[in-house]
Amino acid sequence: MPYVRCIECKQLIPAGEQQKHRQSHRWDKSHSHWSWNRDLPAHKRFARAVKKRDGHRCTKVTNGSRCTVTEGLVAHHLVPLAAEGGHNPSNGVTLCRAHHRAVDRHAR
């Protein structure tokens, strides 16, 4: 899928989703400037969005039941950044530390 760069925040977004992305930009009246939640680094915005979407709970399913861990969570990139996976929340899942170690060990 081709990507385009947002002219306002410089983030890479899938072509065809520009309108949806632009709606995430908002005017911050308290600071008299556009705020795109850019005070945080990209990896932290990614982690927050993924964890929020997944209900702040590990998403690993074993034997038909979802992991119940809600602390020490990690936002895992499905497609690694080195393979140009990016920080789009659709490229992530929330995992507890144990499941994250297992996934990383398996990937080697």
Image (tube, rainbow, N blue to C red):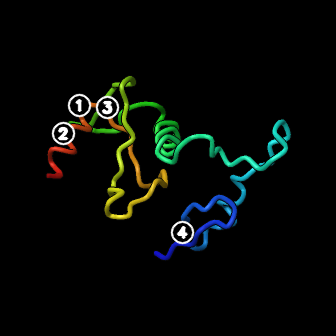
Upstream in sequence: badge 1 or badge 4: 4
Report whether 68 appears left or right of 21. left
Instruction: Return the residue at label 3.
Output: 96
Residue at point 30% right, 38% down?
60
x, y percent for residue 85: 39, 60
Q: Earlier in the sequence, mark 2 or mark 3?
A: 3
Q: Position of residue 18 (x, y in %)?
A: 65, 67
Instruction: Report if the CB atoms under discs 3 and 1 are less than 8 Å apart.
Output: yes
Please state if 13 lies on the left or on the right of 98 as rendered: right
**Closer to the camera, 82 or 97?**
82
Which mark sits nearer the N-terminus, 2 or 4? 4
Q: Secondary structure at mark 2?
A: helix
Q: Mark 4, residues whose alpha carbon is within 10 Å: few (<14), some, or many (≥20)? A: some
Label 2 sits on residue:
102
User: Upstream in the sequence, badge 4 or badge 3?
Assistant: 4
Q: Secondary structure at mark 1?
A: helix
Q: Where is mark 1, residue-wise?
A: 98
Q: CA distance from mark 1 to mark 4?
A: 32 Å
Q: CA distance from mark 3 to mark 1?
A: 6 Å
* Residue assigned mark 4: 14
- The quadrant holding residue 74 is top left
Between marks 2 and 3, how big is the CA–CA gap? Answer: 10 Å
In the figure, residue 17 lies in which quadrant?
bottom right
Kindly identify the amino acid type of the residue bearing the numbered disc 3.
Cys
